[in-house]
Each structure stands twice: as C-alpha cells, then as structure tokens.
Image: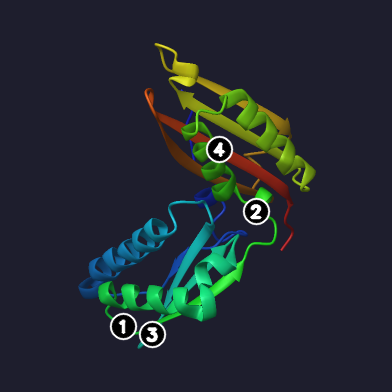
Amino acid sequence: MGQKVNPISFRLQIHKNWNSRWFAGKRDFAKWLNEDAAIRVLIEKKFASRPTISRIEIERSANLITVTIHTAKAGVVIGRGGSGVAELKTQIEKVASLPVRINIEEVKRPELDAKLVAENIARQLERRINFRRAIKMTAQNTMNAGAKGIRIQVSGRLNNAEMARREKVIEGSVPLHTLRADIGFHTARANAPGVGIIGVKVWIYKGERND
C-alpha cells in the first residue's frame, strides 16, 4: 500500500518554507491559526471567479500582520488606483486582531505554478471541455514554459461516465523522492454540472535546487 506524502511538506526547511510564519504561546496559538484560515478564505473567495491567486503568505510581528499575495494578475488584485487593496485591507482587518499591511507580488510565469494550473484545469472541466484535451494542452503549455516535467491526474465521473475513474498524463520527469527537486504541487476541485465533483492534482518539476 503506497504512502502518499505532500511534496511541499516533504521539502520544508530544505528549499520550501511555511506560508504562515509566526510563533505563539498556548494562549494565542488557536486564535491566530483561526485568523490565518479566515484571512485565506476571505482572499480566495474574493477572487474565486478566475484563478489568479498563487500563494498567500502571512507574517506576524508584535503589532502588525503582513499579508503577501502572490498573483498572476496584479492589476486585478490592486484595482483602479489601489482601491482593490484598500477594500481588501478593510475586510481583512475585520477578522484580524492587529493592523494589516498587504504586499502584492506578481507571478511572472503562471504556467509553472501548480495552483494556477490546477485551478485552470478545474475551470475548464466546469465548462464541459473534454478532460483529455484540457490536461494534454495544459501539460504541453507548461513544458513549453520551461518546466522539466509535469504530472496531472483527474479523478471522478469523467465524460459523464457511470463509474468514477482516474486518468493521468505525465510529460518529462517528476522525481518525487529527490529532496533537491523543486516540485510544485496543488489539488483543485471542479464542480462539473451533472456529474458532481472531479478532483484535479498537479505536480510540476522545475529542476534541482542546490541552495
């Protein structure tokens, strides 16, 4: 029986880092953890209509929460004249216990970001695009963008089938056991009309890290 390990947590402190970076005592830990979860849900819901958010990092100091949003479309998040960031900051401060500062960082190559790729496939499946075409085209685009390898797996009632099944496509190499390998991983869910939920998993191998 295979033991599945998340490729991100497997590489923590080797060349991956936590998305929430702070230290708390027993009294504050649960409260801060719930705040972080609420902030992430709020941001994801705000931009749920199109997959633009790659990663949300939260850092806490004694009197400030710094939220860094990595996005493929910085203009959508910032809004006209910065109105989007100001509105988002107001909403976050309603659920946070400290003042909030928001940083926006643009993802230069969204085709190499596992979360954006997985959510893009999920949106295509929701629009009833053939799953084979969706995953093969996406895999090819990622390889053309400079990835060393990609693995995409979809599971559920594919093509309106009576029974759920699992299909995958692999391009290049994806060495999951090599700790030096820089691998991005994400899962997404497509609420496909008439067939229910279809799960999407994406692994993207970007080369070896020596730092």
Q: Sequence order check: which comes first, mark 4 or mark 1?
A: 1
Q: Amino acid at mark 3?
A: Leu
Q: How is the image coloured?
A: rainbow
Q: Residues within 10 Å of mark 2 (few under 14, many from 20)?
A: some
Residue 20, percent across and down? Answer: 43, 67
Q: CA distance from mark 3 to mark 2?
A: 30 Å
**Toward which corner of the image does residue 108 lie, by quadrant?**
bottom right
Secondary structure under tag 2 reads helix
Tags 1 and 3 in contact by the CB under 8 Å rule?
Answer: yes
Q: Residues within 10 Å of mark 4 (few under 14, many from 20)?
A: many
Q: Residue at x 40, y 83 (%)?
A: 61
Q: Which residue is mark 3?
A: 64
- Report the side of 126 relative to 72 (left or right): left
Q: Sequence order check: which comes first, mark 3 or mark 4?
A: 3
Using the rendered image of the protein, determine whether residue 165 is visible from the camera's viewpoint.
no
Mark 4 vs mark 1: in front: 4
Q: Sequence order check: which comes first, mark 3 or mark 2?
A: 3
Q: Which residue is mark 2?
A: 110
Q: CA distance from mark 1 to mark 3?
A: 6 Å
- Residue 121 is marked as 4
Q: Sequence order check: which comes first, mark 1 or mark 3?
A: 3
Q: Which residue is mark 1?
A: 98
Q: Residues within 10 Å of mark 3 (few under 14, many from 20)?
A: some
Q: Is residue 170 above or below residue 79?
A: above
Quadrant where the C terminus is found in the figure: bottom right
**Toward which corner of the image does residue 192 lie, by quadrant?**
top left
Q: Amino acid at mark 2?
A: Pro
